[in-house]
Structures are given as structure tokens and as C-alpha cells.
Amino acid sequence: MKTLTRAARAVISLAALISLTGCAASYATRYNPASDYSFMHKDSDLHYAWNAKQTDQGVRIDGLVKNVEYPRVESLEIKVSLLDKAHKVISEDVSFTVPYSIQSNDYTNFGVLLPKAKLSEGDLLRFLSSYNAVAGQSSFSWFSSFTVNAITGEVVGRREKPDAKW
């Protein structure tokens, strides 16, 4: 009888473990890391998601950046500038992402503080990214940028289709 009880426990434990593993795999394929962020932008090489928050020290921008094009991106630097209605720089800061190397379809955090800045209607945020794209034995330096309305996150100068996939 004890052998049967142990065998039954083992089968039940194994079934529970398998069902938990299945749930974890299902959750991992559906989880969108950008879902916790208010704004998103998708370039052909990098995807961005961020929040903008007014603080006593200035405007805090915290976000994620995802490598969607190259086998590896290295030395990623993101400069965020707050521009007024006349496109003059109010404040800016640079974030150097860690880890140094971001594999294809992987992402990392970035954060900047735009000191002594206050968000106003008509202000813009300009994101300028520079990095080394690495594919096998070759690499090259690249720059990309985009500008958004600082309050709404809407890209200036072009329309984007909303897409839940980040």
C-alpha cells in the first residue's frame, strides 16, 4: 500500500510540475515587456518604450530599447533632449545602456533625467541613438533619431500604425 501511495504522489507531483511548466512557457510567449510603459516607437532597427514623469529635479524618462534588426548591438548610447515650441533645447541627458552588448530580439533599460525641466504644451522629446551594429566579423556605427510630442508621445512628422507587438 505504501508503494502505491508513493507512486501516486510521484505521478501527481510530476503532473503538477508539467502543468506549471506549460503555464510558464505560455506566459513567456505572451508577455510584452513594453506593456508597463505609456509610450512606444518602432524604428526598423530599434524599438523604444518609455514613461515620462515630472519630478522636483526635472523630467525623468525611463524606458526600454529592443534590438530588432542586427545579430548584436554594442555601445548603445541614447541621448534625450527636451525641445521647446521653437525646437530649442531646454535640457538634455545621455544614457549608456548596460549590458554593453544587446543580442537580436533582446532589450535593455535606459533612463535619463532632464535637469530643471518642466513639461509644457507643445514641447518635444528628441531621441538620438548611436551604436555599433555587429554581424559576424563586420560591424559599423549607426545613428538614428525620432522626435515625439513630450506629453502625448505622438511621433512628429509621420504616422505610425498602432501595434501591440513590441
Image (cartoon, rainbow, N blue to C red):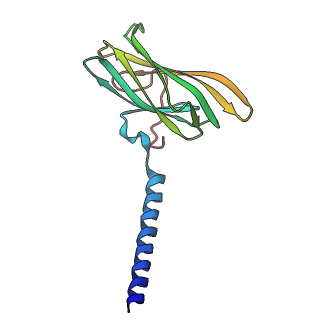
* Quarter holding residue 93: top left
Name the side, left or right, on which 116 lies relative to 39: left
Residue at point 65%, 22% (across, down) = 141
Identify the residue at the far left of this view: 56
The picture places residue 95, in percent across and down from the top left corner, at: 46, 22
Identify the residue at the far right of this view: 137
Q: Nearer the viewer, residue 157 or 127?
A: 127
The picture places residue 139, in percent across and down from the top left corner, at: 70, 27
* Quarter holding residue 154: top left
Q: Nearer the viewer, residue 21 or 64?
A: 21
The picture places residue 15, in percent across and down from the top left corner, at: 43, 74
Q: Nearer the viewer, residue 34 or 3?
A: 3
Q: Quadrant of the N terminus?
A: bottom left
Identify the residue at the far front of this view: 2
Residue at point 41%, 7% (across, down) = 88
Residue at point 70%, 34% (across, down) = 135
Residue at point 45%, 21% (across, down) = 156
Rendered position, 162 above or below 123: below
